[in-house]
Amino acid sequence: MKFSAEQIAGLINGEVQGNSSIEVDTLAKIEEGKPGALSFLANPKYEEYIYTTGSSICIVNNTFKPSQPIPESLTLIKVDDAYGCFAKLLEIYDTMNNQEPRIESPSFIDQAAKVGKDLYLGAFSYIGANSIIGDKVSIYPNVNIGTNVEVGEGTVIYAGATIYRDCIIGKNCIIHSGAVIGADGFGFAPNEKGEFQKIPQIGNVILEDNVDIGANSTIDRATMGSTIIRKGAKIDNLVQIGHNVEIGQDSAMAAQTGVAGSTKVGRNVLMGGQVGLSGHIKIGDRVKIAAQSGIGGDVKDDITMMGSPGFDAKEYKKSYLGFRRLPRILDRLHALEDKIKSLTKD
């Protein structure tokens, strides 16, 4: 589908500079632009590309002032926030690729399940007994939804994801391929013979509205009660969240992060890749944790953590600077010791 510069400007409340009737039918990075493509420039580091890009339309900030002539083939759309407006257009473009409502064959819907309007159900997918699927839900091929599961309106579950029994998925969530929601928590206790005895995991997982779960991430069901991912939280690929964990509203964690059982994470917490949180601790609101940090104790609100074991990032950087200088410090110490010995020999 083609859109003119005038139509795009109307969607994002922008001002056209150039040919308002020029049309685009694809999106491209500004350095990879081609005729018929829409690009954006928000970071001044990429300004050089706007003078050579092949794109037909480029979204720029109102504050942008070109230092060279803009190509005649390029139309600009000026807005308050180029990055935000381009993100809005990406969202519109993405919705155009949504599957049309239909139920493909073969697939299975238990007679005791309830499905809403405008369902897309891909081939080889399964919906178990007493499950409730909301309106406008998209379930891609090879998805397995167990018994007594609830899936809210507008949620998308991509191919190969699995949702175990009794779990609750909110509205407008996105669950990517290979994700497993509601597998047993890691609960075992040694018996009198020293053998591990499995502890039944009878709880569930709750994803509140607007939660994103990345590919091949796993969220374990609670031993009792619920593992909870609060509204708006974003979980990257290859993340492990243990039983009875709670992730706060609008928090985000990057790939390969692991959260051990019964840990509580506050609101607006940001975690880099490969962060590890031990069990039964509490992470405060608005905490930032640098990549590969290991956190073994409670963290108060508004603190930035770094290192393994993790501690305050400012102190970590000072300590690391000292660690890097340690060989030179030791050399100086040995020289000083030798000098003291020579002075005290007589």
Image (tube, rainbow, N blue to C red):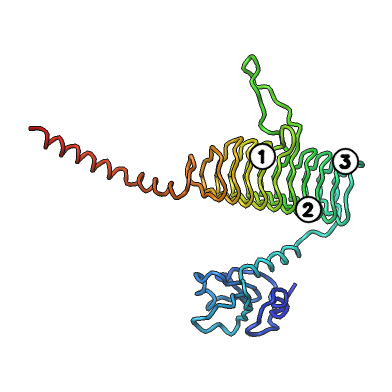
The tag earlier along the polypeptide, 3 or 2, is: 3
The residue sitting at the left extreme is 346
Q: Position of residue 323 (x, y in %)?
A: 36, 44
Badge 3: how crowded within 10 Å, few (<14), some, or many (20+)? some
In what quadrant of the picture does the N terminus appear? Answer: bottom right
Of residues 266 and 124, the one nearer the viewer is 266
Name the amino acid, label 1. Answer: Val
215 lies above or below 221: below
Q: Which residue is identified by label 2?
A: 171
Of residues 171 and 86, the one nearer the viewer is 171
Name the amino acid, label 3. Answer: Asn
In what quadrant of the picture does the C terminus appear? Answer: top left
Q: Position of residue 137 (x, y in %)?
A: 81, 53
- What SS does tag 2 mark? loop
Q: Quadrant of residue 38?
A: bottom right
Q: Position of residue 152 (x, y in %)?
A: 81, 51
- What SS does tag 3 mark? loop
**Residues under labels 3 and 1: Cα distance?**
26 Å
Q: Judge from the rendering whether residue 318 lies leftward or rightward of residue 89; answer left or right.
A: left
Name the amino acid, label 2. Answer: Lys
**Contact flag, marks 1 and 2 (Cβ < 8 Å):** no
Badge 1: how crowded within 10 Å, few (<14), some, or many (20+)? many
Q: Judge from the rendering whether residue 116 lies leftward or rightward of residue 231; answer left or right.
A: right
User: Which residue is depicted at the point 60% across and 82% down?
Assistant: 73
Q: Which residue is identified by label 1?
A: 245
- What SS does tag 1 mark? loop
Of residues 63 and 163, the one nearer the viewer is 63
The residue sitting at the top extreme is 193
Q: Judge from the rendering whether residue 177 lies leftward or rightward of residue 336; answer left or right.
A: right
**Residues under labels 3 and 2: Cα distance?**
18 Å
Q: Judge from the rendering whether residue 231 lies leftward or rightward of residue 75; answer left or right.
A: right
**Contact flag, marks 3 and 1 (Cβ < 8 Å):** no
